[in-house]
Amino acid sequence: MTVQDILKKDLVGSDTLTVEELRFLMSVTDEADLQAIYKKAYEVKAHYVDKVAYYRGLIEFSNRCIKNCEYCGIRRENDKTERFDMKRDDIIKMAQWAYDHEYGSITLQSGERSDEAFVDYVVELIRDIKAIGDGSLGITMCVGEQSEEAYRRMVEAGASRYLLRIETSNPTLYSKIHPNDELHSFETRVACLKSLRKVGFQVGTGVMIGLPYQTEEDLVNDILFYRDMDIDMIGMGPYVVHHDTPLGQEALAMGLDDQEGKLRRIQLGLKMIALTRLFLKDVNIAATTALQALDPLGREKGLAAGANILMPIITIPEHRAKYLLYDNKPCVDDNADKCKDCLTRRVMSIGDMVGWKQNGDSKHYGKRTGLY
């Protein structure tokens, strides 16, 4: 088995990768072979989801969180984080900005809370945003584990997509990077993904790539998890250390955050995008800011390896630097206009177009639901 033999298959057409071929390609490290994989993934992207990057204007509206995940900068016990709740008027203002600047969609992201007051607030916020303009602005939610009823209320209010990252599909590794308590259950995470699908969301998930203790087989199984869960959209990126977290401290002590380690995680991140595109073809895949945190050209490389979604930050400047899930987060000193101009140049630099005013719904979701 060689890379060339596998890529001779008509992957743009009806041919598919076998699990054995996927496993083999995950082991590839030769740069020329990797470039061939990225090129083929871009061809598959161009055919199945077009050479268009769809924007999800990212509004990070609160960094208060009940969870204590070992890797996250806004974890509950990180007392070095300045907590904030964006004013409701500012959230609406930035959603209006997105609509006025021809973004087809926004993402509302916060730390995890599941209390009744929070859910009520979020549901009303969704309704207010859907009232902007002609109601066409798409809304992706990223507010963590909630009850099925809470998810249903969000759908009924007008949200259409939900991103809930599994972080790793390996339950043992999941338990290593999360505290062992009732708030951090792999089974609960999976159950929430099933609930999201049940209530009608376009379902998104994803993993961190290059975690301590993670193997290539884990990454292969992550892609198989996406398939088996019939996921519509994927937001995954390389693990980026946050120095004020237990996992970050462990990674630093293990010497995993040197230049060699960062380059390895970038390579794995791009490989995961490309192989997911080759294996699943019609899902939405994000080129995440974590790629750019480790490589100045990371998001462009992600698009060229098969990604088709970007999430430019439109959080107001006052709060950008407070929503730090990891170190060296890009664009925290920019404003929304600067981010838009910069990202659009990045998209055009690889020959893609921006899907202005387009929702960019998952083609996979359309196929599995029969909508289109």
Image (cartoon, grey):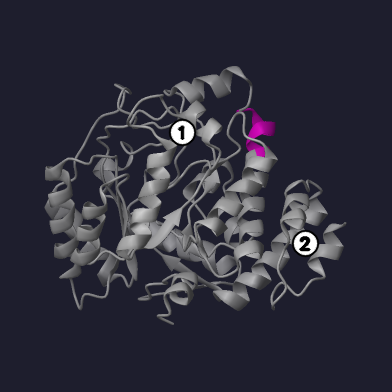
Residue type at numbered disc 2: Ala
In the figure, residue 211 lies in which quadrant? top right
Residue 222 within the segment the image draws in magenta: no
Locate residue 271 relative to residue 155 in the image: left or right: right
Q: Nearer the viewer, mark 2 or mark 1?
A: 2
Locate residue 255 relative to residue 71 in the image: left or right: right
Residue type at numbered disc 1: Asp
Residue 184, image x, y percentages: 38, 32
Residue 79, image x, y percentages: 29, 21
**Separation of residues labelled 2 and 1 (CA atoms):** 31 Å
Residue at x 85%, y 63% (from the top left corner)? 4
The N terminus - image quarter: bottom right
Residue 57 visible (yes or no): no
Query: How many marks can you see?
Result: 2
Secondary element at image label 2: helix
Which residue position is annotated with label 1?
327
Q: Which residues are magenta?
A: 257-264
Residue 256 visible (yes or no): yes
The label on residue 36 is: 2
Residue at x 47%, y 73% (from the top left corner)? 368
Q: Nearer the viewer, residue 152 or 7?
A: 152
Q: Nearer the viewer, residue 74 or 344?
A: 74
Q: Nearer the viewer, residue 138 or 21?
A: 21
Residue at x 42%, y 63% (from the top left corner)? 341
Above or below: residue 1 compared with residue 358: above
Locate residue 356 relative to residue 303 in the image: left or right: left
Secondary element at image label 1: loop
